[in-house]
Image (cartoon, helix red, strand yellow):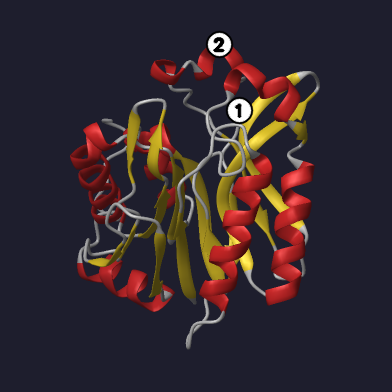
Amino acid sequence: MRICAVQMDVIKGDRKANRAGVQRMVAEAMEAEFPPDVIVLPELWSTGYALDRAGELASPMGGDDAAFLGELAARYQVAFAGGSVLSEREGRIYNRAQVISREGVCTAGYDKIHLFRLMDEDRYLAPGESVLSFSLGGMRCASVICYDIRFCELVRRLAVEGAELLFVSAEWPLVRREHWETLLRARAIENQMYIAACNRCGITEGTAFAGCSMIIAPDGEVLAHAGTAPGTICAEVDSALVRRVRQAMPVFDDRVPGLY
């Protein structure tokens, strides 16, 4: 299965401009010699952190943005996994990652569990209350969003429950770039899983974002790295490698969960 991360600048509060950027970059990715099977987008790719307008910009279950991605998915026969949007449910707003099938159907969603208080998420958003696992291309997958990767317990639970590939969408700042890269490799190595992480780039209101989207193998090898400018990265993932790595270093068999 071929994964592509679309690293883009995100214009705060401008859904039209952001959708145009996604449309252009997806078209370029699909015109490549080896087009992807799955695309992952950044966190809040359609609106950025316009949280003071979250009630205006959110749609029920993120349906407006899901429909837009659904049209692209059906046109190009490509799935989307990750890439979060503002989503309204029962009067509350969530930061929701979406899974869109190759047929254009939104099949699953994950609401960000760990809200980042330094970006005022806790003031405007409700936290998610459940994890998400799903299948793509014969692989067991899971999705988390940005700040979630600092919580190793969450990712370990997903791995123990069978995840072989973790999609990460983020708006991670440049000032903590080393944390981003180190945490992603650590989550891949300790859980012996692929990581497909897409971060935004660019500058909004004086905050520079790191980019540095990465696709990492279950042994920690960085298969693709985007740098700090807009662009796409792609890599092949294979569940057979996950099995080989887990057999060679059987950390899951050697866990002692009763003590920790």
Whether residue 37 is visible, yes or no, is no
Percent across and percent down for residue 128 are 60, 28
Above or below, comparing residue 152 to residue 39 in the picture? above
Q: Amino acid at mark 1?
A: Glu
Q: Position of residue 71 (x, y in %)?
A: 77, 63
Query: Could you say which quadrant of the image residue 95 lies in?
Result: top right
Q: Residue at 35% across / 26% down in the picture?
A: 206
Compute the Cα span from label 1 to label 2.
Answer: 17 Å
Label whose residue precedes the other's in the sequence (1 or 2): 2
Q: Foreground residue, 206 or 256?
A: 206
Query: Amino acid type of disc 2?
Result: Arg
Measured from the top left, where is residue 122 in percent x and y? 52, 15
Which quarter of the rendering shows the C terminus? top left
Label 2 secondary element = helix
Q: Secondary structure at mark 1?
A: loop
Above-or-below relation of 181 to 253: above
101 displayed left or right of 9: right
Q: Total of numbered circles in the picture?
A: 2
State the residue in front, 2 or 202: 202
Q: Is residue 221 left or right of residue 206?
A: left
- Residue at 63 percent across and 39 percent down: it is 85
Q: Is residue 208 visible?
A: yes
- CA neighbours of label 2 inside 10 A, class few (<14), some (14 to 19), many (20+): few
In the image, is residue 260 above or below residue 215? above
Q: 224 or 23: which is nearer to us?
A: 23
The residue to which callout 2 is attached is 123
Q: Which mark is residue 129?
A: 1
Residue furthest to the bottom: 33
Q: Residue furthest top?
A: 123
